[in-house]
Image (spheres, rainbow, N blue to C red):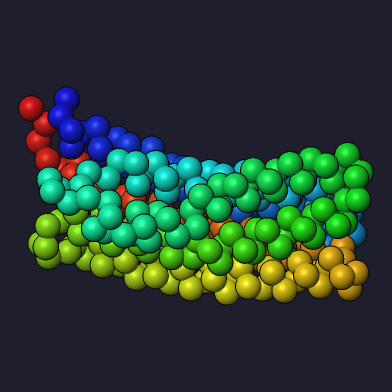
Amino acid sequence: MNTTYLETRSTEAAAYGGLVDALGGIATAVLAIIALSGFAREVLAGVATIVFGAALLVQAGTILSEYANVVLPAGVGASSIGAEALGGDGVSAMFLVGAAGVVLGVLALLGIVAPVLTAVAIIAFGGALVLSAGSARHLYQLQTALRRGGLAQSGGELIAGQMSAGSGGLQMLSGLAALVLGILAVSGVYTPILTLVALLVLGVTIIMTGSTLSGMLLSLMRPASSQTLP
């Protein structure tokens, strides 16, 4: 079993992580819609906060696992590439905020100032999305540069690159929107409604970014999987 096979299996597992992330986004959006209809708003808002926090943890873990499998050429150090290209652009913040979101959601379900805690979690989620908006794009650029060695890209890889760039812009806008909605909710302006609207926006965003991440990783996996194993 060679290194290429191990790398391919790792990338395949990471791609499934992106799909799980998208499922978490679907669950968050569905819970927010049900709560907006007037059914158990505080309870569902707390549950949706926990689910979205877990989805952020999955997405951060997926991206970090791919960075961990990056093999730099001999003589090329991390300092020569830069912290931004090696995941130092908000992925760690996404991981920490995801864990904090789960904790805040659990406290909200316990009835400890639930509207305030969920609104604070929304602000944290929005900030994490803004900070990590370019993570998928940077990962794609780094992996294609190292794996292809300057060779021409396939059509699937070009499409994956465009998708990663588009999802980064969407994530940035959604993060800013969540920040604004969360701040308004904390200030007491229609707190339950704005919190649920923000969760709906965040859920839809994580659906798009999770699907994009899976598609990007699978597009990078195909060329390697076509090689003959000894």
The C terminus is located in which quarter?
top left
User: Can residue 59 be seen at all in this image of the molecule?
Assistant: no
User: Can residue 116 be seen at all in this image of the molecule?
Assistant: yes
105 or 204, which lies in front?
105
* Residue furthest top as drawn: 1
Q: Using residue 68 as the reference point, say whether residue 229 is left or right of it.
A: left
In the rendered image, residue 220, in percent from the top left (x then y), is placed at 26, 52
Q: Quadrant of residue 156?
A: bottom left
* Residue furthest front as drawn: 79
In the rendered image, residue 10, in percent from the top left (x then y), is placed at 32, 37
Q: Using residue 28 as the reference point, say whether residue 131 is left or right of it.
A: left
In the rendered image, residue 90, in percent from the top left (x then y), is placed at 50, 58
Labels in figure, total: 0
Q: Using residue 17 as the reference point, say whether residue 138 is left or right of it.
A: left
Residue located at (73% from left, 50% from top) = 49
Residue located at (74% from left, 41% from top) = 103
The N terminus is located in which quarter?
top left
In the rendered image, residue 172, in percent from the top left (x then y), is placed at 54, 71
Residue located at (68% from left, 68% from top) = 178
169 or 71, which lies in front?
71
Looking at the image, residue 61 lies above or below residue 94: above
Q: Quadrant of residue 37?
A: bottom right
Looking at the image, residue 168 lies above or below residue 63: below
Looking at the image, residue 67 lies above or below residue 152: above
Residue located at (61% from left, 68% from top) = 175
